[in-house]
Amino acid sequence: MKVQAKRAVSLLLALVLTLGLTANAAQVSAHLDQTARYLHTTVKDPQVGSVGGEWAVLGLARSGYAVPDSYYTTYYKTVEDYVQDRKGVLHSKKYTEYSRVILALTAIGKDPRDVAGYDLTLPLGDYDKTVWQGLNGPIWALIALDAGDYPVPGNPQAKTQATRQMYVDCILNRQNPDGGWSLNAGDTTSDPDITGMALQALAQYQDQAQVRTAIHRALACMSARQNASGGFSSWETENVESCVQMLVALCELGLTPEDARFVKNGNTLLDVLATYRQSDGSYCHTRGDGGNGMATEQAFYALVAVQRAESGKNSLYDMADALPLGSGKDAQGLPGKHKDVKPAQVVTPGLTFSDTNTHANRRAIEALAARGIINGMGDGTFGPDKTMTRAQFAAIVVRGLGLPQQAVTVFGDVKATDWHAPYVGTAYTYGIVNGRSANTFDPNGTITRQEAALMVARAAKLCGMDTEMSALAVRDVLAQFTDYVTAADWARAGLAFCYREGILDDSALEIRPKAAIHRCEIAQMLYNLLGTAQLL
């Protein structure tokens, strides 16, 4: 559903900005850091709410600013308690409440489909209730669902089951004759706030001709509505929020703040945004006022959107690169882990691959790649459906567990000068791998699914997980698969453990134990292991 050309556009945008806007980028970075510090110190305990809550969490999480994981962990516990207290009903009428929380949870790497046992995306499957409050409903439903590429949930209580296309069509059908949008049906006075939001929601659907036409009309409308100073007014008042929504819209569409259509008397929207800035890093709603919470949070995530665009990262609302909660320095692992097991830190945040943009295992691949645990093919691709050798697997497990490398030469077919020698030696020393024989490792041999499962189970034991299973328990787990008897005796306990702990997906009908495992599958297995072992 997302436009495949979007990443190419983002890369081109990054090149243009790098060549001509380095000073501008430095200013954005300085302003972003100051406002991040301001928000982190003023919103100390984010709650469920439109101010002092989700927008602050989302902005900080997407900014890359160094916030302790405990900040997000505390917020998530607050959300869990809030959801539990209300039995999963955040609001009976305003379904944007669900969308806002979904966005914040996705930004911190938490799954909104299981919060205290409730699926917060479920209400968005009800079309009539989602659109009840006006155009905000379908707009933010699309943005929230697309942020994590979540399927539109089937809602058995809905009078009309929603689809993405229904929400897209709802937005298109509500476009005003002048090309913009307004919040309420029947209001033909286009508003820059709601128009900017509509453009943000439609940005992911530019492969549809009707959407492209609507976007071009809206951009022309807003260019004409822009004030001589470069800003925007809502309800006859020039304000920062209107500027913010159009600025974020440009970034989501892959356009620069310097787009000629939105430069008035030499002022860009970014220039205008700076005029609302206060000396402490906060932002005012209208010039002359003091710092305002809502204005500051919105201005901040607009700065984040610009910086992400300038650096070629995923856009503000394309959160496939969001790392799981616990991915920072606060990750400690389970109490019973081996003393040498250490969480791998993020070294290349936002690293992506051209062939995993829409891949089912994208989040796992990018989370491991960001930590240097797994590498691409060297040409910007990952090769998700390629196989992996035994030596490569040993390397990613050793990196994933942060084990100190051991210069141990055990196998005759692993020379001390081979790149993989320290990884094989380390994995062998810690009992993760064995050889094909006493003197042979077969480093270039392709690893099978059952071999990978056994090695991951051994790694899990080092992580402090209980891997012991009785023969009866092993049989009970594996009996659900039609081909479990084809698994080797030595691999069955490892396979059963991986299925029991959710490291392997048990929704498939077959294990295919002797099939070569793909790189994407290995990435998902290790990602699941590290998450369960509290090492992410």
Image (cartoon, rainbow, N blue to C red):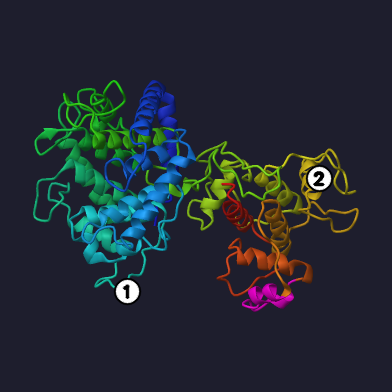
Please state if 149 lies on the left or on the right of 261 as rendered: right
Of residues 459 and 81, the one drawn nearer to the viewer in this rendering: 81
Q: Is residue 513 above or below residue 45?
A: below
Look at 39% across and 23% down and name the residue there.
30
Please state if 102 lies on the left or on the right of 329 as rendered: left
Q: What type is the residue that disc 1 sits on? A: Pro
Percent x, y of residue 149: 41, 56
Residue at the disc numbered 1: 156
Please state if 428 lies on the left or on the right of 102 as rendered: right
Percent x, y of residue 309: 40, 36
Residue at the disc numbered 2: 425
Question: Residue 254 sits in which quadrant?
Answer: top left
Tell me where the magenta segment starts and ends, as one range. Answer: 472-487
Q: In this view, does 291 lie above or below 426?
A: above
Of residues 519 and 485, the one drawn nearer to the viewer in this rendering: 485
The mark that comes first in sequence, 1 or 2, is: 1
Of residues 216 and 230, the one drawn nearer to the viewer in this rendering: 230
- Is 86 covered by the magenta stretch? no
